[in-house]
Amino acid sequence: MRILSRIFFAAFALLVPFLIYGFGLATWRALETFSISNARWQSFIVGVIAFIPTIFVGRKILPATWAWLETFEHEMTHLIVGLVFLKLPVGFRVSAHSGGEVKHIGWGTTGQTWVTLAPYFLPTVSIFVVLIAWAFGIGTGYLLIALGWTTVFHLVTNWAETSFRQPDLKKAGLLKTLIVLPVMNVICYGAVLAYVAGGAKGFSEFWIQSVARSYEMLPK
């Protein structure tokens, strides 16, 4: 399985420039729809702005609770992506002052790079909200406000404490980190922005058009 994992990662690395082009173009097109008069973007920005007093209160008034929440979301991302690679969690620890840890079993080191780096590209709660909204056709302003809040929460909290999170990046290795994070951040945050810009239809078209543009750039 280790050989297959290495082959898969090598293939992914070769595709990175094409994926960045395809998904980057689709993300840019989503951003081009931004307008302060657009109700969908208004709601999303309200959620982003609402995060500012929340993080102030959390870090200044309830620091232990806030630190625990940050760590919980971080470790849950490890756990969820581990399940994608058939890794069963056998241990889950979260603390307010000494970090956290998820222990997995199953399939050796297969997918370990993705599990390790997942919190640095996957806005877990935001993607979950988008998938629910996409599947059930929910598109209220309140949902977009929540989406703005959760997106900036993940973006800020998982990069704010780089020294605290450094073991993850060291475990993955510098080369794999530089290969995975740029393209996966474009893909994941692009998907969120595509939903904000165009709802369920925009979210679906984001994936279709991104894959199509990436394929068009492949050497024939």
Image (cartoon, grey):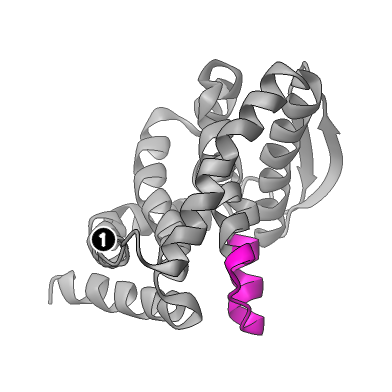
Q: Which residues are magenta?
A: 127-143
Report whether residue 206 is seen.
yes
Q: Amino acid at mark 1?
A: Trp
Q: Residue furthest left?
A: 220
User: Residue at horizontal 77%, vertical 37%?
Assistant: 102
Closer to the camera, 50 or 176? 50
- Residue nearest the observer in this picture, 32 or 22: 32
The quarter of the rendered structure image containing the N terminus is bottom right
Q: Residue at x 82, y 30 (%)?
A: 94
Q: Pinpoint residue 124: horizontal percent, then vertical percent.
A: 62, 53
In the picture, the quarter occupied by the C terminus is bottom left
Is 22 or 73 nearer to us in this picture?
Answer: 73
Asked if the magenta segment contains residue 135, the reply would be: yes
Q: Which residue is mark 1?
A: 28
Q: Which class describes the residues within 10 Å of circle 1: few (<14), some (14-19), or many (20+)?
A: some
Picture layout, residue 1 above or below residue 33? above
Q: Position of residue 186 (x, y in %)?
A: 37, 53
Q: Residue 51: say if magenta.
A: no
